[in-house]
Image (cartoon, rainbow, N blue to C red):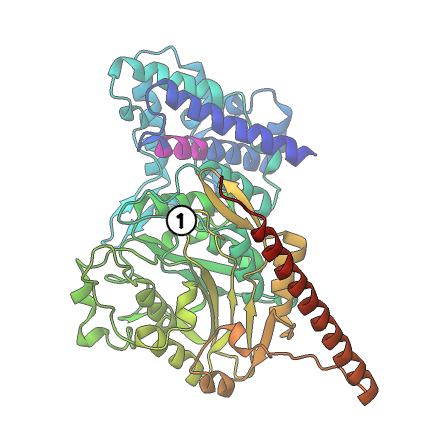
Amino acid sequence: MVTQDFEKRTRQLIDNLKGICASYGLGNDGNEFKIITQVFLYKFLNDKFAFEAKRIDTSLSKTDNWELAIAQLSADQLEMLQLQMGPDTARLKPEHFIAHLFSNQNASEFAKLFDDTLRDIAITNNDIFAVKTDGGAKVTLFDRLSEYITDESKRDNFCRAIINILVEFSFERIFTQKFDFYAALFEYLIKDYNKDSGGKYAEYYTPHAVAKIMASILVPEEQRGKVTNASCYDPSSGSGTLLMNLAHAIGEQRCTIFSQDISQKSSSLLRLNLILNNLVHSIPNIIQGNTLLHPYHREGKALKKFDYIVSNPPFKMDFSDFRNELDTKDQHERFFAGVPNIPKQATDKMAIYQLFLQHIIYSLKPGGKAAVVVPTGFITAQSGIDRKIRERLVDNKMLAGVVSMPSNIFATTGTNVSILFIDDSNKGDVVLIDASSLGTKVKDGKNQKTVLSEEEEEDRIITTFNTKEAVEDFSVVVSYDEIAAKNYSLSAGQYFEVRIEYTDLTPQKYAAKMQDFTDNLDRLFKESSELEQEIRKQLEVLRYE
């Protein structure tokens, strides 16, 4: 009940911040998400510092004004306090606190003080919280937010309105909560900012059901708490939904996250997700850049290999401007099945997922596991790059299975998708599941999406896959040889048995059934003849007037 109430109040905080942006002309503005997410993060870091300070020095929790008590510490005492805090807590100074800004909100040029405070926090914590680009530049925590207000005369009031909202709210009561709680908050926080905008680098929020299924199959229940020092990678990470679910399944302190994404917005959202989910130690591995053209993570000169890889890669992104740079001799090992050609018609799909899938296979450690969202057409295509990739997975015995999902599992795209599970250690049978008939259709804004029930349908998929159970018209368990014999098809439906039910009849029962059929047919013929005679009789009495 406490968490439900707090979640409700947190959503209200987010809505209030959006209301302030709307009042100052930034509603649905391209910069609104920066203001909302960065202000939310500032408040979160402020309260996390308070939570840690009170945990270390219990006398602070007994005072009415912990901010003032910390401000009265000497420089050495403050440094000692900060050294005892966990690495996921920002190092703040008394002048960084929200209470300090609140007490100085009537100062002239308050917007400048607000921006300077956030920028100083970013600089002070740059080594821990900055996201890097593939060129080595650092993307700091905070921008000068007031400068998104075009009218300079309104900037002070804009910042005052934000501070007055923040001072009335506290995160301190919920820092002991777990992943699912923060996942719900994060999804609500970014729900308006991580949708398909129709642009070149369209982004899609991966549904929680898809993320849960992927993580629960990669890390089954019996393995949880046993995996250690795992490297987890997503080459097209977006805001990090898949990585967060995977890290939660393994244990946040038992794994290290690595990612790359071409979108600066997505990289910033992923950083926020890592901070919320106790994964700050992985922020240095979050890279903003083009994975295909400039893969960042390396061990020496070679690309780094990972224990786990998850990905929902783009299906249609335009890569025509760098396609030729990928189709070179030194890239042939990574793109072993080839580089897709650019379609002649601009409206035709660009199969960029084929490049990401090859990159994932190449980046997997021996014995490593991966889960990748692919268009369902991939699992049956009988020619081209798709077929070659499937042949590599089957012939090298590095496939765990496939789950074909219901249509519209993503509300923002009509493309049917399947989840491809790769397992370099699986030399036995492969599980193929057809879950296309599951789920309930619901409206999501202007779109329709399919929602799986958590306890029945999601768990049914996970349990069936992990136990390698064959279920009529739902799942099959097949060998690598059987797959090769079926032209490397990974569609469960092509392996389902065609069942014809037979009923044993004695000669007497057979004769009786045939007599029933004959009698019924005679009756129908007689009725037809009578009807024909009646129609003729009615026609004869018709007269032309």
Q: Which residue is mark 1?
A: 204
* Residue 30 sits above or below residue 327 on the image: above
Where does residue 177 sit, x and y in percent of width and height? 61, 42
* Whether residue 227 is visible: yes
| Location of residue 306 with respect to 120 vertically, above or below | below
Q: Position of residue 160 (x, y in %)?
A: 40, 16
Q: Nearer the viewer, residue 120 or 342?
A: 342
Q: Is residue 75 above or below residue 538?
A: above
Q: Amino acid at mark 1?
A: Tyr
Q: Which residues are magenta?
A: 33-42
In magenta segment, residue 224 = no
Q: What is the x, y in percent for residue 51?
A: 57, 35
Residue drawn 57% across and 52% down? 540
**Among the 4 quarters of the image, the one containing residue 147:** top left
Rendering coords of residue 509 (x, y %) = 82, 83
Above or below 337: residue 289: above
Residue found at x 39% / y 38%? 193
Task: Categorize mark 1 by other alpha carbons within 10 Å: few (<14), some (14-19), many (20+).
Answer: many
Q: Quadrant of residue 148?
A: top left
Residue at (52%, 66%) from the top-left corner? 403
In the figure, is residue 355 to the left or right of 216?
A: left
Quadrant in which the N terminus is drawn: top right
The verdict on residue 40 being magenta is yes
| Main secondary structure found in the magenta portion | helix
| Residue in the foreground of this view, choosing between 136 and 533 | 533
Work out whether residue 251 can be spotted: no
Question: Tag 1, which secondary structure?
Answer: loop
